Amino acid sequence: MRPLQCRLSLIVWPAGEYRHQQQGRPLRRPGYTPSVAVAVVVVIFTVRQDRLNVLLIERAAEPCKGEWALPGGLLLPGETLDAAARRKLEDETGVSDVFLEQLYTFDRLGEGKAEVVVSYFALVDIGRTRLRSESEWRPAWHPVHPTPPTAFENDRVIAYAEERLRNKLEYTNVVYSLLPERFTLTRMQQTYEAILGERLDKRNFRRRVVGLGIVRPTGRFEKQGAHRPAMLYEFTSRKPMIL
């Protein structure tokens, strides 16, 4: 059986605090200053081989040594949440100028010494990433379906981030962060399909994305084997916006 802290971590109250909480009394005792450790975890998505993938780290220390977990860690002194998330993103992928958004705050994830875990999710183009090559704390891409067993209930965080991403495709342009500067509409459609988990009608998809004005033709073409060269497109804006 996996260690309890790898599955679920409860906040441990000082002696007597839980009883006072149950009785509806204030938790603080005279002279007692609560101390809460805060950690950040980042769900980093990419599309790889037409499948949505997430970056996981193989833990090299206890607890949960040898298990897969999301990139994360405790905040550094004086560090903001956003800065910590961007630091972890850049450390693991080599990129930072991509879509990154705070996702949710959990208080029941076993993240070492942290009672509070603030989650983020990021979208990266696989072609731009450069994963660390160290043998310890090894990073690797994994398909979201199926996600391997993860430490600290990280599967909950991944599922929540995937749902948020699917919803965002309906009303934002955040897919730009998963694609290179120039791309074909076929590749863009394949990216949508990888996230949504379903096939889309080619004609309707193209009419919609072009009609929304989020992409424009570059005048350049990509040769695709014996087929007719395909027009390359680019986003009208590579910053998040509501459609």
Image: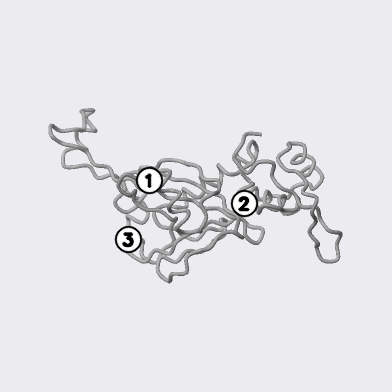
Residue 19 in the image: state x and y as whole percent. Answer: 19, 36
Q: Which residue is mark 3?
A: 63
- Say whether disc 3 or disc 1 marks the residue closer to the N-terminus: 3
- Residue nearer the viewer, 227 or 238: 238
Q: Quadrant of the C terminus?
A: top right
Instruction: Tell me how far mark 3 sits from mark 1, CA to CA.
Output: 16 Å
Instruction: Tell me how far mark 2 sits from mark 1, CA to CA.
Output: 26 Å
Total numbered labels placed on residues in the image = 3
62 up-or-down from 178: above or below: below
Residue 111 in the image: state x and y as whole percent. Answer: 35, 52
Taking the spot 23% from the left edge, 28% from the top edge, the residue there is 24
Badge 1 crowding class, 10 Å Cα cut-off, few under 14, some 14 to 19, many 20 or more, is many
Q: Secondary structure at mark 1?
A: strand
From the image, state whether disc 3 or disc 1 is nearer to you. 1
Q: Which residue is mark 1?
A: 117
- Say whether disc 3 or disc 2 marks the residue closer to the N-terminus: 3
Taking the spot 16% from the left edge, 38% from the top edge, the residue there is 16
110 up-or-down from 22: above or below: below
Instruction: Give residue 94's mark.
Output: none
Q: Is residue 152 left or right of residue 166?
A: left
Asked if marks 3 and 2 touch (Cβ < 8 Å), the reply is no
Q: Quadrant of the N terminus?
A: bottom left
Badge 2 crowding class, 10 Å Cα cut-off, few under 14, some 14 to 19, many 20 or more, is many
Which residue of the protein is positioned furthest toward the front in this rendering? 219
| Residue kind at label 3, given as amino acid type | Pro
Q: Which residue is mark 2?
A: 178
- Residue nearer the viewer, 154 or 114: 114
